[in-house]
Amino acid sequence: MGRKCSVYGCKTNYKSEEGCGSERKVSVYRLPSDSAERALWISAITNDNFTAKQHTVVCELHWPPGFETISKNGKQRPKHPPSVWPNVPSSQIPTPAPSPRPTKRTSSSLRNTEADQLACFLNSDSVTFCDLQSILLASKSPKRDLLVPVFAFMDDSVVHVQSKKMVNGVPLFVVRISQDLTFVNFHLGVRCTATTLSANKITTLQTWSAFEENIRFLNSLELDNKKKVIQEQLQAMGTQQIGKPVYTPDMIIRAFTYFATSRCLYERLRHDFQFPSVRTLTRITSKVAKLDESAFSSAVFKSLEERQRL
């Protein structure tokens, strides 16, 4: 009986095959003595737990018909490692690596789709300071439609974009754009920041998308307490009272609230909120200091001079 093949699942030259005739006896070959060739043969055998010993052999069924041989020590043996695995379970056959996918993208015409438009959009969306000048400062209507009606003018190499909507004589918003495309926003005369842009770390108006988002944010921004106080003051000052300090009872009461909290704080807030001076508050306090709380509000208002009452 010939030696048994060491490949997992191969049943050639086993005792159960003895009665099948000599034609069932299959030639076998030892592993090469050269260490490099021996390693190639071992790596080609499918069994992961394969251990090569002195008399380990592989039958000729694991080579294709008519395989090439070489002479070693007067005997013929296969030139190349085994590559055919009959009767071997599929789980033991190594799966070859899949062929690499082509690096070139499939043609858009074959996929019946349009080409990627991102590059075209980024190119058309970019803007320079000269573009702002040519479009916003054009003598005719702007070439690009904006979300809200605005007009622009140039002052000291800075483009001012101002809303046409006025609130008590103050524009709803003003955007000052410098030559390096940095910008400063003012909403009802108060400097502010577009949070939708700052959250994305956008500090320059290098694209029309950022410019339009900045205009949209300023147009939809709600009034905070500071702006409401300023608007109350502007409403109290009619056209005939421009330049004269006029105070409503609410402003006087609010001024006393800040003044009672901290005099230093009141000094900082007085100009922003257009409150009375410390001298005026001191004069009012000296007149109404002895009154109870119920009569305090009316006494405060009456203590003002006639020209300062609304």
Image (tube, grey):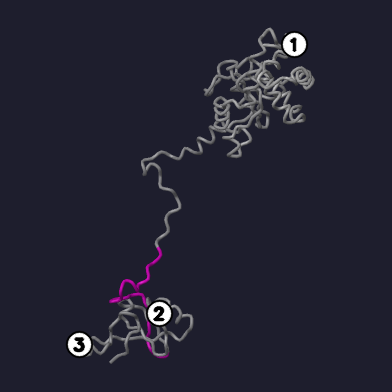
Q: Which residue is mark 2?
A: 49
Residue 282 point in image, percent of width and height? 78, 21
Give the CA distance from mark 2 to mark 3: 31 Å
Residue 70 point in image, percent of width and height? 40, 83
The nearer-to-camera label among 1 and 3 is 1
Secondary structure of the residue carrying tag 1 is: loop
Q: Residues within 10 Å of mark 2 (few under 14, many from 20)?
A: few
Q: Is residue 150 left or right of residue 158?
A: left
Give the CA distance from mark 1 to mark 3: 131 Å
Viewer-closest of 258 and 70 = 258
Q: Main secondary structure of the magenta part?
A: loop
Q: Which residue is mark 3?
A: 20
In the image, what residue type sits under mark 3?
Answer: Cys
Query: Quadrant of the image for the C terminus?
Result: top right
Give the CA distance from mark 2 to mark 1: 106 Å
In the image, what residue type sits under mark 2?
Answer: Asn
In magenta stretch: residue 18: no
Q: Is residue 282 left or right of residue 191?
A: right
Secondary structure of the residue carrying tag 2 is: loop
Precedes in sequence: disc 2 or disc 1 = 2
Precedes in sequence: disc 1 or disc 3 = 3
Secondary structure of the residue carrying tag 3 is: helix
The span shown in magenta is 73-97
Q: Residues within 10 Å of mark 1 (few under 14, many from 20)?
A: few
Q: Which residue is mark 1?
A: 305
Residue 270 point in image, percent of width and height? 73, 24
Viewer-closest of 159 and 26 = 159
Q: Quadrant of residue 273?
A: top right
- Residue at (71% x, 27% y) in the render: 258
